[in-house]
Amino acid sequence: MAKLMVINSGEGTEVPFLRGMLTRSLQDIGLDFDEAYDLASDVKDALSNRSSVETGELKKCVSERLREIHSDYLANRYESQIDATHQVMIRGDEGQLVPFSGEAHSKSLELCGISNEDARNLSRILGRHLVARNRKEINTSYLGRLTYRVLLREIGKKAAQRYLVWSEFSKSGMPLLLLIGGAPGSGKSTISTALASQLDIFRTQSTDMLREVMRMMTPERLLPVLHRSSFDAWQALPDADGACGQDDKVITGYRSQTELLTVSCEAVVQRAVRERVSMVLEGVHIDPALIRRLEYDSDVVVVPVMLGILKQGQLRKRIRGRGGKAPQRRSQRYLQSFDAIWQLQSYLLSEADKEQISIVANEDRDSTVAEILSIIADTLSARLKPTLKQVFPAAG
């Protein structure tokens, strides 16, 4: 069977028909995968005796199928999608040209506290605007001003101002130091990885890894506290069988281990600050005492966050789930020490509250990431007061 080619006479292009691309396009308007795949297959079969088809005819064929099988609403949504053959190019500050990416643009909008779905819809609105006006090339300033106005109209002033703040921060060269603490099982690693990806931060460090390096360098007989978990480090203390209560022992052991890691944490932070790069530092050892000791320049943006799982049943479930994802963590041992972990979390949340450190209840990944992004945006907004003309001074 000859390959079906899709021709755009206006652009002078000829590309093969790809069922997968049409399927994804149909998913974007609200069809589930099976519905989208079936409709894309129907269209392919209907054109199977053809060697080529014009883009307009193809779009009409898909639209008619949508009206027959689904609804006028979905057909209208499909017809209003950005024409993939119309490529808008963005000229950067240094003159480089890159194609407009709806995915990359929507990612930047999520930093403003907008949901993934709303961000994607806004990027489509903006893309359709550019296509409708036959814009082939724009500069970053024009894109920024247009994005600001779309946010202002569709979402509101707060989201639009956050967009300006994030844009100004990205140009400033100011490093962001994100400190994520929490008890074992609170989701620190998962949330930190997601935030690093969202913020394009390439330097991440866990206090668990720092502890592991120190263990390799220091025999257990010299520093036994270092070779225990944070919640049972008390068992390696000289007076482990003393008269103080179990709760006090857990916290004393934790603080003793955290103190040993302070220098290592300070070292990785100072290097990031010295090199002017943003960094995520996460781990159970991120506590208010450590945060107070860290030193950094005045233009470094420091955002400490303490994660918590506020229901015992949910924390047990998370700890139990760690066994499948990372067998080496021995979730059973964690469950056997659950009371100590719960006590440690209570201490961390209490100390964070005293120091006015943001506490985020980690119910699910997406909402937690969104909340922390909002915290970062609020921190930046307290320091940066950009105007539209300052951030995007010239329209292209």
Image (cartoon, rainbow, N blue to C red):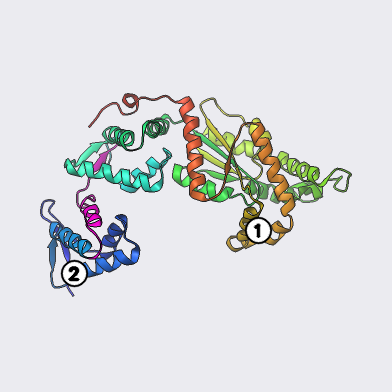
Dot 2 corresponds to which residue?
A: 3
Task: Tell me if residue 98 can be seen.
Answer: no
Q: Position of residue 175 (x, y in %)?
A: 49, 33
Q: Is residue 66 magenta?
A: no
Q: From the image, which quarter does the C terminus lie in?
A: top left
Q: Is residue 19 above or below residue 201?
A: below
Q: Is residue 89 magenta?
A: yes
Q: Quadrant of residue 344?
A: top right
Residue at the spot x=51%, y=48% of the render?
193
Q: Position of residue 134 (x, y in %)?
A: 16, 42
Residue at the spot x=64%, y=53% of the render?
315
Instruction: Say which mark, if any, is on residue 329.
Output: 1
Left or right relative to 55: residue 307? right
| Label 2 element class | loop
Residue at the spot x=46%, y=47% of the render?
197
Query: Which residues, given as a range, are shown in magenta?
Result: 69-92
Q: Name the outermost residue toward the bottom.
A: 1
